[in-house]
Image: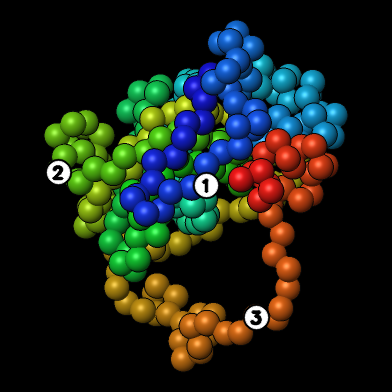
Amino acid sequence: MPLRTPVPVLPGRERPVTDPDTPSHGDAPPDVIRPGSAGEHVFQDQVGSTDRADRFYGDQLRDRLLPRMVEFIGRMEMAFIATADGHGECDSSLRAGPPGFVEVIDEHTLAYPEYRGNGVYASLGNLVENPHIGLLMVDFTESLIGLHVNGRARIMDDDAFRAAFPGHARDRAAGRRAERWVVVEVEEAYIHCRKHIPRMERVTQRRAWGTDDPARKGGDFFGAKGTPQRAPRPARRRFPSTTHLGAGASRALRRRPHQA
C-alpha cells in the first residue's frame, strides 16, 4: 500500500524536526508495512482494535479504484474535499455538479473541476503547500454508502487538462466551463459504512451554475457582514492533539520540549 509521505512546505513554514524515537514506516521491511498513519496504529494499540483495523485494511482498503467504485463515482453529484496546509491546518469544502462531474481517468487517477468561486481558493491554496487530499462521496438516496479516496493532487489549467486528457473535460452543465482541474493520484480507496448515513429524497431543483448573484449564492446568510473579523477569546489552556492518548503513545508521536 502507498504510504503517506512527508509534506513539502513553502520556505519559512517548515515543521519542527521529528522526534528520533517516533515510529517510522521507513525502518520497517516492506512485508510488514501497514496502511494508514503512525497515529492510527498507536491509537489502535491503545484501545485494542489492531486486529479489527487489520481486517478492515485487508478486506476493504485498496490502492486503486475498483470497477464498482468507478461506477459509484460516475453517478455522484457532490464530493466533500479535505485539504491541509503545510502546518496541518485543515479545511473542508464541498464540490458539486451534474452526475459524473468527478472524472475517472483510470483506476489510479481521478479529477474534478474547479469553477469560479469567491476568489479565496482555500482548497487550492492548501494544495500548493501540501498535495495530500481526501475526498468523501456519499450516496444519500439509493445505496446509502460512502467512498473515501485519498491521494496526491496537482492543479492543472483547463486548457492543459483538456490537452493531457482529451475526452475527459466534459462541460456537463450548459454555459459552465472549469477554470482549472484538480487531478488526484489515488493512494487509498475504501468504503464508508452506511449505518449512520441518513436517507434523503431527491427533489427537483434548478441550479444557478456559475452565477454571481449574491442572493442565489447565499448572500450574508449567517450575518457575518459588519461584525468584527476577530474577537477576544476567553483565556484557556491549549492542549496538543495527542493529549487524549496515554503517556507512552503521546511521547511516541510528538517531540517533548525537554528532549530538544
Q: In this view, does 25 lie above or below 72?
A: above
| Discs 3, 1 touching: Cβ within 8 Å | no
Q: Which is nearer the eye, 140 or 23? A: 23
In the drawing, what numbered circle is on residue 159? 2
Q: Name the residue under label 3.
A: 233
Q: In this view, does 29 lie above or below 224?
A: above
Q: Earlier in the sequence, mark 3 or mark 1?
A: 1
> Mark 3 to mark 1: distance in Å?
27 Å
Q: Which is nearer the eye, 110 or 209? A: 110
- Identify which amino acid the numbered label 1 is placed on: Pro
Q: Is residue 71 visible?
A: no
Residue 124: give x, y in percent of width and height: 35, 52
Residue at the location (74% across, 42% down)? 250
- Identify which amino acid the numbered label 2 is placed on: Asp
Residue at the location (14% across, 34% down)? 163
Q: Residues within 10 Å of mark 2 (few under 14, many from 20)?
A: some
Q: Earlier in the sequence, mark 3 or mark 2?
A: 2
As helix, strand or loop, the secondary structure at mark 1 comes to: loop
Q: In this view, does 188 lie to the left or right of 184?
A: right
Residue 159: give x, y in percent of width and height: 14, 43
| Discs 1, 2 touching: Cβ within 8 Å | no
Q: Is residue 231 above or below residue 9?
A: below
Picture quarter with the C terminus: top right
In the drawing, what numbered circle is on residue 16? 1
Residue 145: give x, y in percent of width and height: 63, 37
Q: Which of marks 1 and 2 is nearer the N terminus?
A: 1
Q: Residues within 10 Å of mark 1 (few under 14, many from 20)?
A: few
Q: Can residue 225 be seen in this view?
A: yes
